[in-house]
Image (cartoon, rainbow, N blue to C red):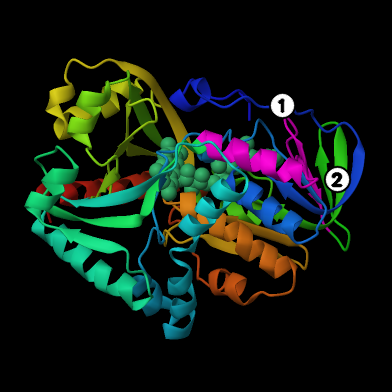
Amino acid sequence: MTNTSYPASYYAASANPVPARPALQDDVETDVCVIGAGYTGLSSALFLLENGFKVTVLEAAKVGFGASGRNGGQIVNSYSRDIDVIERSVGPQQAQLLGNMAFEGGRIIRERVAKYQIQCDLKDGGVFAALTTKQMGHLESQKRLWERFGHTQLELLDQRRIREVVACDEYVGGMLDMSGGHIHPLNLALGEAAAVESLGGVIYEQSPAVRIERGASPVVHTPQGKVRAKFIIVAGNAYLGNLVPELAAKSMPCGTQVIATEPLGDELARSLLPQDYCVEDCNYLLDYYRLTGDKRLIFGGGVVYGARDPANIEAIIRPKMLKAFPQLKDVKIDYAWTGNFLLTLSRLPQVGRLGDNIYYSQGCSGHGVTYTHLAGKVLAEALRGQAERFDAFADLPHYPFPGGQLLRTPFAAMGAWYYGLRDRLGF
Ligand SMILES: Cc1cc2nc3c(=O)[nH]c(=O)nc-3n(C[C@H](O)[C@H](O)[C@H](O)COP(=O)(O)OP(=O)(O)OC[C@H]3O[C@@H](n4cnc5c(N)ncnc54)[C@H](O)[C@@H]3O)c2cc1C
């Protein structure tokens, strides 16, 4: 990782004040060494600290440097692949466990925000917007499916109703999830980091894990220090590189881009999204947007397979924004940035153990704000010896991307091109 400063995002520009955090320059001992201070790492650290573990977090850059400090801020429930697909692949018992957990991450976020008084502009309400009748049919069956697992805060929106919640003429209908919502993602991560420290956890920034010495008492090495631990949690996600080679073959970093407009003012902002819900459409290559606390529109979309940084983000995303909201044609874009998420072939999270004491969770394939919070809880449960829920994730099958390291990016891009074409043609 060469650049360890936050990107020039709206989030970095509006981040709450944070303490300076030193780099590790010592040899330390701890119960659990967490690698990565995104939501997965911070959520794990918090649950472990709340359960009496001593925790040390190593962050290569800064808290929330990765996807957790750059994302669309949408609290989207469930997983990047739906539970019926999971059920077909793993059977009803495991699907039941995963289905029961599908909405837990959003509850965890709300509990964290309330318990640790995190200032992150939390708002309730997320909309899935259908561009075609086929997508609307899918939402109808998704509602029935989610209700089967007890998730009932869902309302189908017909064309008239969706126009009341979003001033975009493209949608034929949608579904409102009042247990969805949105947050300032970096401030959520920073608040969680402060909570970790309030419970005695230690976070070292600018401290990349460069080597893991495996064994009964594993040691994580950084350039200037090391951490000996009983357990390690690997939570570096798309920014992990090749630290754990076993994980790299079955996942692929992808970039996605976000822009933030200038503040729109109350009237224009309210005319776009009167109830201040966040919205994502139902395309495979989806667009997502919401208002910020100071009434900017944050708009994201597009995927760059292999995670190369595009030269002109505004040129990619602004046309998408204007397609949804032509009324914003004179509005200035103040910020544009990119971030990496980790894709797996099944689009389901990659979770497991290496030996007895190295645990990992990564690869939630674009929908990770809620899952990563759940992952922290499930990992902490496993370290406490209650692995039933952890195993439900760990038993999900994962496969290498076709084409190996060299060809997986063009292969995945071809697949996405095909699905993008289907989106555009309305299939
Ligand atoms: C632009 C963008 C928009 C998104 N929008 C949404 C959205 O609206 N809703 C949604 O649900 N999901 C969204 N996602 C996905 C979501 O943000 C991620 O799934 C989630 O934040 C992943 O959290 P994480 O902690 O696993 O990884 P990250 O947040 O990426 O954190 C990993 C951390 O590990 C550190 N690290 C890596 N390697 C090492 C090492 N060797 N040593 C020490 N530290 C290391 C990194 O510096 C980084 O800080 C989006 C993702 C992106 C990129």
Distance in Å between CA atoms under marks 1 and 2: 22 Å
- Residue 133 in the figure: left or right of residue 220: left
Quadrant of the snapshot with the C terminus = bottom left
Q: Which mark is residue 19?
A: 1
In front: 28, or 303? 28
Callout 2 amino acid: Val
Residue placed at 44% from the left, 53% from the top?
Answer: 403
Specify the quadrant of the image occupied by residue 208.
top right
The answer to whether residue 188 is magenta is: yes
Residue placed at 19% from the left, 67% from the top?
Answer: 140
Which stretch appears magenta? 186-214
- Mark 1 nearby-residue class (10 Å; few <14, some 14–19, many ≥20): few
Describe the element under mark 2 as helix, strand or loop. strand
Q: Which mark is residue 227?
A: 2
Residue placed at 65% from the left, 52% from the top?
Answer: 245
Asked if residue 212 can be seen in this view, the reply is yes
Residue placed at 61% from the left, 38% from the top?
Answer: 191
Specify the quadrant of the image occupied by residue 304.
top left
> Mark 1 or mark 2, which is nearer to you?
1
